[in-house]
Image (spheres, rainbow, N blue to C red):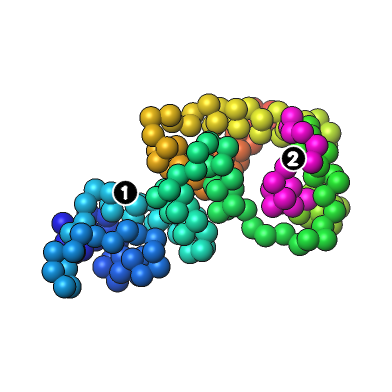
Amino acid sequence: MRISELAATADVAVPTIKYYLREGLLPEGVRTAATQADYGPRHVERLRVVRALVAAGVSVAEIRNVVAALDDPPAGSYDLLGIAHSAVTPSVPDDIDTASAEDLYERLGGEPGTCEPRLLGGLAVALATLERAGFRVPVDVLDAYVRSARQIADAEIAGIPDDSVESAVRYVVLGTVLTEPLLLALRRAAQQIVSSERYGG
């Protein structure tokens, strides 16, 4: 298909596709003339991945890393998670105190000193934000957070497809990026249900 057909199929504007091509986020099509190329299903699929990442707020530089993993997948699923987490985990200050975050990581079942620095920093920032606000999560509630996070992670990791490395990359990267708003929405919906059951209304 020509670029105009690709744009119509993927519902992405032609100038946007050309930008993705220039940035190396989309592979080149097969040249059919000096100014024309042919595109196929792989391009449609890649456009959907890129658009999903853009919509989730992932930077072009991080999308480039994800695309590189799609084009040259790492050997194992553990490395795929690293790519997914790097794409969506913001940088944190180097001087942040991570002691409480390390404790929380170990409560999840992690080995001391093994948490990826940006993930540990993200935990530390979240805890510091609560502390600055003067809000303390009750111990039983924090225990529920830890148990629930571990159960979710167990289910997600068990769901990584094993039919191809590319499908595993897509599952891990997009699953990490796109399900966080769903988790938040489910939590709020559950709060409404439980509060209604408890307090009436």
Q: Identify residue type, mark 2.
A: Thr
Q: Identify residue type, mark 1.
A: Glu
Looking at the image, which is closer to me, 194 or 34?
A: 34
- Is 109 magenta? The answer is yes
In the rendered image, the quadrant that contains the N terminus is bottom left
Left of 88 or right of it: where is 69?
Answer: left
- Compared with 20, 84 (above or below) is above
**How many neighbours does mark 2 have within 10 angstroms: few (below 14), some (14-19), or many (20 or more)?**
few
Point out which mark residue 114 bears: 2
Q: CA distance from mark 1 to mark 2?
A: 35 Å
Left of 157 or right of it: where is 52?
Answer: left
The image shows residue 44 at horizontal and vertical percentages of: 28, 52
- Compared with 143, 134 (above or below) is below
Point out which mark residue 45 bears: 1
Point out which mark residue 82 bears: none
Identify the mark nearer the N-term, 1 or 2.
1
Span highlighted in magenta in the image: 108-124
Residue at the spot 26% in from the left edge and 68% down from the top edge: 14
Residue at the spot 46% in from the left edge and 49% down from the top edge: 69
Splitting the image into 4 quarters, where does residue 194 fall? Answer: top right
In the rendered image, the quadrant that contains the C terminus is top right
Residue at the spot 60% in from the left edge and 27% down from the top edge: 154
Label 1 SS: helix
- Is 187 magenta? The answer is no
Question: Could one spot residue 107 in this view of the protein?
Answer: yes
The image shows residue 43 at horizontal and vertical percentages of: 28, 53
The image shows residue 55 at horizontal and vertical percentages of: 45, 57
Question: Could one spot residue 130 in this view of the protein?
Answer: no
Looking at the image, which is closer to me, 45 or 69?
A: 69
